[in-house]
Image: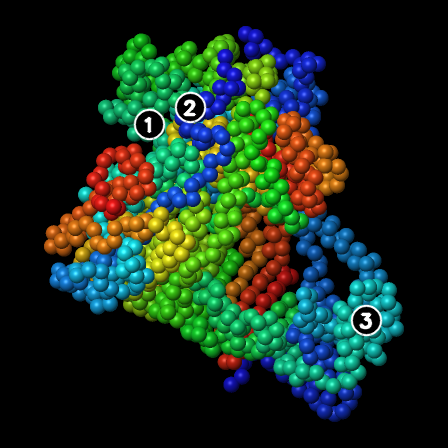
Amino acid sequence: MTTRRDFLKAAASVPFASLLPAGHDGLWLPRGDDRVLLVLELQGGNDGLNTVVPLHDDTYARARLRLSSVREGALALDAGFGLHGDLAGLHALCKQQLAAVVHGVGYAEPDRSHFRSRDIWHTADPLHQRVAADTTGWLGRAADLLAAGGASMPAASVGSLQVPLLLRARAAAVPTLERAEDFQLGVVTTGGAADERRAALVELLAPNQVPGLPPEAAAVAATAAQAAAMAEKLRTQLQRYEPKADYAGSQLGADLQLVARMAIAGFGTRLFHVGFGGFDTHARQLPTHAGLLRQLGTALGAFAADLAGHGALARTTVLVHSEFGRRLAENASQGTDHGAAAPVFVLGGGVKPGLHGTPPDLRDLIDGDVKPTTDFRALYADLLGWLRIDARRVLGGDFAPLGLYA
Amino acid sequence: MRMRSTFRPEVAGRTRAFALFAASGLLPLSAQQPLRALLPEACLAVVEVPAPVALYDDLLAAFTPVPAGLPDEVRATLSVYLLALPWLLGEAPRRLVDTLARGGAAIGVAPGDGKPRVFLILRPGDAAAAARWFGGHARSVSWQAHGEYVLVATREADSRSLAACVENATAGRFAKWPSHFCEDAAVRVFVDLEGLRSAFGRGQHLGENLDGGGRFLFGALAAALARARHATLALCTQDGLRFCAEIDHSTADTPFGALAQHGTRVRTMPSPPPGTLLAMSVDRSLHALFTGLDRFLTPEQKLGAQAFLSIADQVDGRSSFVDDLIGGLAEPIHGYVIEPPPAIPGDAQPRLLLPGFAFVAAIQGKDVETVLRRTAQVFTLIVNAERGQRNQRPFHIHSCAEGEWHGLSGELSEWRGPGAPPIEQALSPTLLFGQGHVCLASTREAALAVLGEVAAGRTQTLTGDRIELYGPALARTLARSREVLELARMLDEGESRSESHRFWSVLQVLAAEIACLRLALVPGDDRTALELSLRRQP
Amino acid sequence: MTDLLQPFVPTAADPFDLRKAGHLLRRAGWSGSLRQRRELVSAGVAAAVESVMPAAAVPPGPELLQEAIAFGDIEHVRSHRVHACLQSNHPLRERMSSLWHDHFATSNKKLLDPRSMALQQAMFDRLGLDTFDALLLAVSRDPAMLRWLDNDTNRKGHPNENFARELFELFALGRGCYSERDVVEAARAFTGWHVIDGQFHFLAAYHDAGDKELFGQRAAFGGEQVVSMTAARPESARWIAERLLRFFVHPQPSAEEVEALARCYTQQQRHLGRTVQTLLASRLFFSARVYRSKVKSPAEFVLGLVRLLGARAAPAELARAMGAMGESWLEPPTVEGWPRDMAWLNPATWLLRANFAADLLEGRRGKLRPAADDLVAAAGKPSERVAAAVDLLLDGDVTAASRARLLAFAARRAAAGPGGGAALLHATACTPEFQLL
């Protein structure tokens, strides 16, 4: 006959595994030096060829009579390639050896639908057919692994209304954050005594050294104590935060600043997603793309400077990617249509700087699109390795890493 | 050239008469000066009521009788308040107003630390009785009788300084205040905008925090407010209630002024057809906005607009949204919301019955019809594809010709499922051309109603922006979907069924009482006028 | 009936007190106000259990359902479900529907069809306490279920086994109680069961009318017969008995308990209402082992808090809060339904619950009527105020350790003045006992 004592043992065997930490000798607090990954997704299909611009390629110039004018203002990266002139912020990071570019990232048999291609990048499954209610994303699976190891909020999505497929997990709770205050201990504020009430509540929730609670209640009390401790830690860390860079007031800047605050606070959330839309430049690409890249460059520069100022850049990596690149040839509306492979950026975290991967050959195209020379899952494998998470379990297979990290 | 105000003709005669009378020396000096001239210089806003008793009578006539359809509890509450009022005041309200302020009243508001300072000058009908009333009732203010006036202020010190102003009888700065606007109004408020801005250190950049849509619609007004020096607000009580305001800076004379193509010129719009609950025409040009994004939007808003354009241009790949489509229309586009047509017995109706939305504009480009037809067809494909994914029935679009109008119209197939049909069952998106106009509407009936006015040549003239709300049609529209609206309020606000029912009943009854509610913004050469007028059902 | 399922008879040592009344309302409903609990105590256990059972099979007004669907919006339908739970005079009906919704998990994320989801919920309301045979048949013909498990593309010659497999594995039998052959044959029996225009239609042209071999018998079975044969199997009785025990009694029911309830269920001709009534009146239900042995799900926490306070709040806000905590009705995460017990609770979700309680008590989640401060006297000795709060939210039953902490809280400035009553209630809602069902 089962007794209450078996409750805790049984709880650990429930299919959606218990998320209580294994050690019960006190509180488990996240280590302040955990590595953090931010996936910054450029939504709409960023034009890779006009972002990492081939400086001396005639094929490029002939296929894009008007759009190739970006070559004139390009900021040189190496002999063959330069960054779009409005990416000054990112260029500075490259010059400081803090950023890497990976050429031609994509997957075989490109899908040019926004939704399907996004889903493929998010689930790390190029054969993916249809999103079911229980499909998980690659970062969601990574979050599940972290959660099984005891983390209670391993991942968060910033600035979107719904958690994107990328972060959909089986067991881990992944919230969407708009403000850092969302994860602090709330109190009744009528009558003004908010601080006093918070202090009283923290005392109420402090871990109970005196035995007296039945096992189920004890398990709940331990969770509550942990929650209160985490919330208080976050609050004091956030109070101490002082921005070391100017995020220039854009929405992207605000989202990145929230990620920076959480990363600097060492709260234990290690996987983030931020989306930045507007890149579907079918018509009149030049001014639109320039504006977007300018915002991107400024925001990334501020993000990196802020983290560096707090000494957190070495343990934070940013992956900047898009669901596909765009066609080599420009269309009749001075824009470009959906394409295939595109370059991605990896910043921070001690990444090996410079240009990686094989630059795509513009004479060897698939259907007029750039052929991928790097499988995006190899990129993921590198990042997961850096995060010290088991890549095979997340990606469902082995992929030879790209060597982005020493 | 001064603005030709609609108020001019009535007022001009009266001003002349007064000037003659004053010049003849038959008026004592103090009566020549308006009461507001006696208020302290520090005041930034001044309220003047020349004939308080007449105002009382007019307001009473406007608000009573109380609408018959109001729920019993609401009527009971109102009656209790009305009965308690004389008891609270000490005597019948009308008599009190006459006693305290037969000869006029003026209120001045000046900034103070924390709370504003208020000054009140009254010219009572019965000075002794007024003094007695104040002695008995006024506890938290400081008052004093001074000759033919009673002076009231929120603070002791202010009361003394007010007395000093009256004593000297020198004309304060409000004596020379521009006051030609609505001279026969029952109540007028004069605001020193410049003073307000410097007192609070804000307001110079009014409107810069608005989002894209806000800038498009209100940017010019906000900019004019930030630059104007004087504002006059007036409440006119003849022929319904009219609230008017004027500022001495034109919206046309601001960076956003270029968004208004017509500016101070008069234009026409088709008359609202019978059954209209809202008619709207705002003089804003989408073409001007999209061709001048840098002028009107912040960089971030501009990115948003460009993202929209790159998709809009893609829908009909062969033409430009801004140049061929918007540019081919004579802006502004007029909008109408029309009550749903009566139910056909036997036809299953959705529980939530939307009114019809119709947009009409004159055509000035030759390709507009082709572009719009193509765009409509692509749009239909996209919408039907998405509906197909959700196992919903598609819209069937077909050509349609109705008298002098030709175009496209669509609807869903007949409803056969369990229960009431969904909202979209009552939609019949329609695009019609003819007589140099185009109309896009959510229902065929709405399109034909508006185009009927176009065909008959029935128009109305206007300057600037105008929105008109017709209460009875709104009340009938609400009545068609009452249960659904009541449930929505219960779910969103946590009200009980009876509370929700009462809310919508009051709204519906009040709406039925309002013959017409008009909001208008009229730019002039060097001033801008706003008007909010309310006419009750006879 | 074995000892376990004998009716509970209160004694002086083990009376039917506020704790047991609260326990009954928590498990068989969404908790109840202090007044309701006290009424049950004075009525006695038999009358109390009787009052909890719904009257005849009267479904909630179809008019209200049509109005909820009118907007075509899933949040609206979800808010309407929450509203129905709060307003219901016999919340056991909605409780059973939530059990069946979890058991026959169907998600709008795939269907994108609020109308069908609402009609499925109405079906659970109608048949949730009827016989399991009737319920299972209705589920098999439900348009939302058919599209969810792809049975609407199940045709003669191109069978789709998804529905048949889940019918056996998850809905009615459990793993290991059937063979692969049974699944294939059952799938053939369900061919031709289609959805047209949101309604069930049997298309004979697509139906495989040949002989099928199922559970060792051979005949030209149709879908209805598969359903009744499945429901009649003894493994099904045990599967359903275990499900009911896990929902109403204890997360880890013993083999003995499962056998006892399965026997009772079979004796009652598989009538769910009579079985549940027996269970709710039993000694097992009111035993010490079962009391506060489960962790509240988000719905039980959110709706329970509102009903315990005897208050009204905006259903749309409550539905959103439940969604944030992980239980978004009409959108279960997988075909296995939602997580259970301690899996609901981790520091992040605990924080969401505590913050929700603070928001609700303050009136930030829609007006709370009556307001929280009015429920716990603003003045008065700390021990009296704590007693009032504990009575209100915890039936007066809290461990000595927790009571000591609450007294310490009540003595501080935090619990004084305007908002102090609400703060004390918030602290009570943060005790570990409050998270237990």
Number of labelled discs?
3
Q: Nearer the viewer, residue C160 or A185?
A: A185
Q: Considering the image in quadrants, where does the C terminus of chain C appear? A: top right
Q: Residues within 10 Å of mark 2 (few under 14, many from 20)?
A: few
Q: Disc 2 is attached to a residue of which chain?
A: A
Residue with the most extreme left position? A363
Q: Secondary structure at mark 2?
A: helix
User: How far apart are labels 3 and 2 at the CA level?
Assistant: 80 Å
Q: In the rendering, at what x and y percent does residue C217 appear?
A: 31, 9
Q: Nearer the viewer, residue C153 or C352?
A: C352
Disc 3 marks a residue whose amino acid type is Trp
- Residue A83: image quadrant is bottom left
| Tag of residue C151 | 1
> Residue under circle 3?
B143
Q: Do marks 3 and 2 share a subunit?
A: no
Pointers 1 and 3 in contact (CB under 8 A)? no
Q: Secondary structure at mark 3?
A: strand
Pointers 2 and 1 in contact (CB under 8 A)? no
Q: Answer yes or no: is residue C432 visible.
A: no
Q: Residue at x 65, y 12 (%)?
A: C9
User: How far apart are labels 1 and 3 at the CA level?
Assistant: 85 Å
Q: Is residue A185 left or right of residue A157?
A: right
Dot in front, 2 or 1: 2
Disc 1 marks a residue whose amino acid type is Asn
Q: Considering the image in quadrants, where does the N terminus of chain C appear? A: top right
Pointers 3 and 2 in contact (CB under 8 A)? no
Q: Residues within 10 Å of mark 1 (few under 14, many from 20)?
A: many
Dot in front, 1 or 3: 3
Q: In the rendering, at what x and y percent does residue C291 appear?
A: 58, 21
Q: Disc 3 is attached to a residue of which chain?
A: B
> Residue under circle 2?
A13
In the image, residue A333 above or below residue A164:
below
